[in-house]
Image (tube, rainbow, N blue to C red):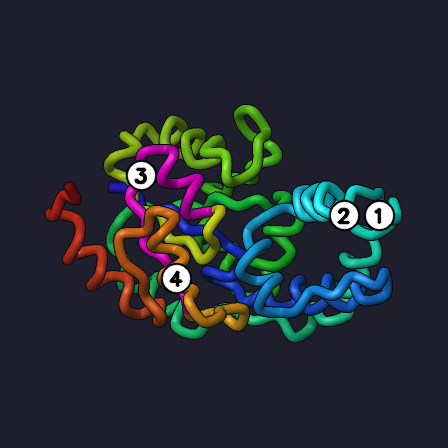
Amino acid sequence: MLVIFDCDGTLIDSEILWAQASIEIFQEEELDIGLEEYNSTYAGMTNEEIIQQLEEGLERALPHDLIDRIQDRAMERIDTLQAIEGAQEMLDQLDYPRCMCSNSTTEMLEANLRRTGLWDRFRPYIYSAKEVGTKAPKPDPNVFLHAATTLDVEPAKCFVIEDSFHGVQAASRAGMRVIGFIGAGHTYPGHGEHLMDGGAETVIRRLVDLPATLEALKDWQPD
């Protein structure tokens, strides 16, 4: 069995930083998007995907420097970045092989995982969707299938821990089992139900509950 973790919003509390930065920049462009709407709609997507979706809805182009401005604004908050509560304790208790699959770049993953003390808990088994396989980001299953193939584990024997609807969709499309996580700073009302709708079998609010949840599910096969 292989346990696959998302990174942002699952192990480090970074989604909320990017959400706040994005909303501030969008407001400068007179785009009225609230925090709850942003988190429920765009969490787990790349900045490029978010901008493309916004442009399609608006039927107009947005400034070409929008992503750079969001990244600059988010980096102003980077010193506040922390691991999700209980992450280290959970990893100490986890007896199964593990890896990480993210839409973030390897450069960003290394910087943020080192900053939060988690880099050595996963390296070298850290995969960026943009840099492996077909290069397609979640909700495409590309990065999850690449991890399973690389580590020689059948997709059906993989458990994925994800905080976003798009990540849950990607893992489900890969034929993997999914546990949703709703304990980060960007969670919103209905978050758990949203992840279940995407294909999660159950959700947890505390990372320290993951080992027991895996033990409860691993010998049970869903219909």
Q: Amino acid at mark 3?
A: Met
Q: Which residue is mark 1?
A: 62
The local crowd at label 1, few if under 14, some if 14 to 19, many if 20 or more residues have their Cα within 10 Å, is: some
- CA distance separating discs 3 and 4: 16 Å
Q: Which residue is mark 3?
A: 176
Q: Nearer the viewer, residue 50 or 81?
A: 50
- N-term mark: 2 or 3: 2
Q: Nearer the viewer, mark 3 or mark 1?
A: 1
Q: Nearer the viewer, residue 150 or 62?
A: 62
Q: Nearer the viewer, mark 2 or mark 3?
A: 2
- CA distance separating discs 3 and 1: 36 Å
Is the residue 193 above or below the residue 4 in the image?
below
For numbered disc 2, what is the local secondary structure? helix
For numbered disc 1, what is the local secondary structure? loop
- N-term mark: 3 or 4: 3
193 left or right, relative to 1: right
Is the residue 148 above or below the residue 32 in the image?
above
Q: Which residue is mark 2?
A: 58
53 left or right, relative to 216: right
Q: Which residue is mark 4?
A: 181
- CA distance separating discs 2 and 1: 9 Å
Question: Does the magenta portion include 211?
Answer: no
Residue 31 image offset from top left, x and y in percent? 78, 61
Q: Amino acid at mark 2?
A: Leu
- CA distance separating discs 2 and 4: 31 Å
* Span colored in magenta: 167-182
Q: Amino acid at mark 4?
A: Phe
Q: Are marks 2 and 4 in contact (CB under 8 Å)?
A: no
The local crowd at label 3, few if under 14, some if 14 to 19, many if 20 or more residues have their Cα within 10 Å, is: many
Is the residue 11 above or below the residue 97 in the image?
below
- CA distance separating discs 4 and 1: 32 Å
- N-term mark: 2 or 4: 2
